[in-house]
Each structure stands twice: as C-alpha cells, then as structure tokens.
Image (cartoon, grey):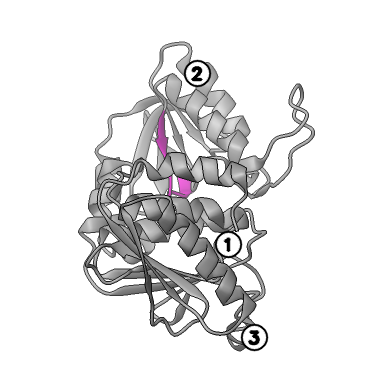
Amino acid sequence: MLDTNLKQQLNGYLQYIVNPIEISVSGNDSDKSAELLALATEIAEMSPKITQTSGTAARKPSMSIASQGQAPRVHFAGIPMGHEFTSLVLALLQSGGHPSKADPAVLEQIRNLKGEFHFETYISLSCHNCPDVVQALNLMATLNPNITHVMIDGALFQDEVNERQIMAVPNVYMNGQPFSQGRISLEEILAKVDSGAAERKAAELSEKAPYDVLVVGGGPAGAAAAIYAARKGIRTAIVAERFGGQVMDTVGIENFISVPYTEGPKLAASLEQHVKQYGVEVITEQRAAAISKDGYVNVDLASGATLKSRAVILATGAR
C-alpha cells in the first residue's frame, strides 16, 4: 500500500508516539477490505507501540484507532489515503499521546464539552477541504470521551450518500442530523456545539480596550492594511468570520505576482503568520453587524459584543 517515500515519512512520524495504540480493522470479502487490512498491517509492523486487531464496525471496510485498552472513538470508513493520509497520521500520533499544536484554550474547551456528540463526515479522497474538517473532529474525539467521529469515503458507501442526498463534500452529520457542509474550522465547530461559548466570547470581546486601528475583514486586503498599520507601532486588530476570507476556498492561485503557483489555504497561513509577527490581534468567528461613532468608532458584532477603535478600515471583499 505504501511506497518507499511514504514509508520513510510515516516511520519518522511514528517515533513521536508516546503511549501504545491499537488499530482495529473491520472488513469483508471485498478488495477494498484487503487493501485496508494490508495498510493497517504495514503500519503496525513499523512501530512496537502499535497493535493490530480485528474490529466489529458496522461499516466495512473501516479502520478504528484508539489508545490501548480504550474503546475507539476515531474511525475511518474507507481507506485514508490521498489527501486523507495526513488525517490518518495525525490520528495515530494524537491517539498515542503526541500533543496537538492547537491553542491550549481550545483544547481545554474541547475537554470540557458536555453532552454526547457523534460526528460523521462524508469525504472524497480528492477533496482539498475535507482533511481540515476530518482532522478537527478526530482531535475532538481523541480529547473527549463523549465524542466520536467517523470519516466516510462516499465513493465506497454510495447507498448512504444517496439516502442522505449528499451533493458536496465535506458534509458533516452530528447525532444523525445535518451539521455543516463545506470547510469548517475547529473553532467554528466548537462555537456550534458549545452553547455557552458565544456568550462568554462576546463578554470577553466587549471588555477589550479601544484599538488604534480595527480592520473589518480577514482577506489579503485586510491583512495588508493591518500589517502597514502595525508597522507604525499602533495597536491594531483584525475582526473577521475567518482569516483568509474567500482565499481559503481557492485551490489554485496563479495570478499572485512573483509567485507562479500557490493554494488558498497555504497563502492564508502565510498571511496570518506575517500579520501576527507584528503583534496584530486576530479575532475570528465574528461578523460585524453595525458601525456607529461616539468619540470612538463602535463596531457592533452579531454575537452581541462591541469593539471600539479610533479608526476602522473596511476590507470586506466581494461579500
């Protein structure tokens, strides 16, 4: 299943596993089941901390990953190759105790979630946006025993795709009901499932001291405005629904001068890194609803919070 290059990469990553894990494979007589079993066997043979067992999942073929002795909460219904290979690697590492690079406050919020959450994500192995969603939900399932997640390759489970009338991926269900469609970040998922998060965030934002410059919009224009303002040494922030704006939905970019080719998420990550180098505060998951002036410029957010600034720059893009 794995070529020499992938084996070398995977072998390097598996060194970071701290605690023993189990991979359980649920299969039938199909060729895809044989492929998945071969993949699991190869992985298990690469690390003494990985044990392979037989599984009892309803969907076949499927692979489940868990810390040794625990019931699995992370599942792959299908063969997690292509764009989902990274999702598989991260699931192995995180189940084995390797820490996530996510914000510690976000990780703590996940651990403290109350209730039962069972997520299903329909994907295509050629989908560029699917891995981010799969990885976010896998991380949540790894950290909280009340959360489970299964990635479902729609190409192998066409009956489900037809029954649920899934027209695009990624498509997420929670507890059997539609939850989201398209790219969604870890923070956006938490905002939807944590009923008290929005109120806490709004109160926190309203208490922030006034900014010198507040940029409304997190796309390339907003990033450029924030960088030039912050370079002057003034207190600057960006507020947006998500950093990167519509660039995040763009697969190939070939008209960015001096860069022959890049991809939207990659460009957005570089922009965010550049912005934060200048100490710009980036406030996401927020939509500006109204602007008024009473000495300061007040930006009222849909969440109920109000941000104050001496000046506001609107960089809202095509929307």
Q: Quadrant of the N terminus?
A: bottom right
Provide the major secondary structure of the magenta segment. strand
The picture quadrant where one finds residue 20 is bottom left
For disc 3, the neighbor class at 10 Å (few under 14, some 14 to 19, many from 20) is few
How far from the left and from the top, in percent, is residue 127?
64, 58
Q: Nearer the viewer, mark 2 or mark 3?
A: 3
The location of residue 94, given as percent across then percent down, is 34, 51
Q: CA distance from mark 1 to mark 2?
A: 33 Å
In the picture, the disc for residue 229 is 2
Identify the residue at horizontal 32%, vertical 46% (top origin).
17
SS at badge 3: helix
Amino acid type of the residue tagged 3 in the rendering: Asn
Label disc, if present, on residue 80 of the rendered structure: none
Of 160 and 90, nearer the camera is 90
Left/right placement of residue 6 relative to residue 140 reads: right
Residue 283 among those drawn in magenta: yes
Asked whether residue 103 is in view, the answer is yes
Q: Is residue 102 left or right of residue 179?
A: left
Q: Which residue is under mark 3?
A: 162
Disc 1 marks a residue whose amino acid type is Gly
Q: Are marks 1 and 2 in contact (CB under 8 Å)?
A: no
The range drawn in magenta is 281-291
Residue 179 appears in the figure: no
Q: Is residue 199 magenta?
A: no
Q: Amino acid at mark 2?
A: Ala
Residue marked by disc 1: 182
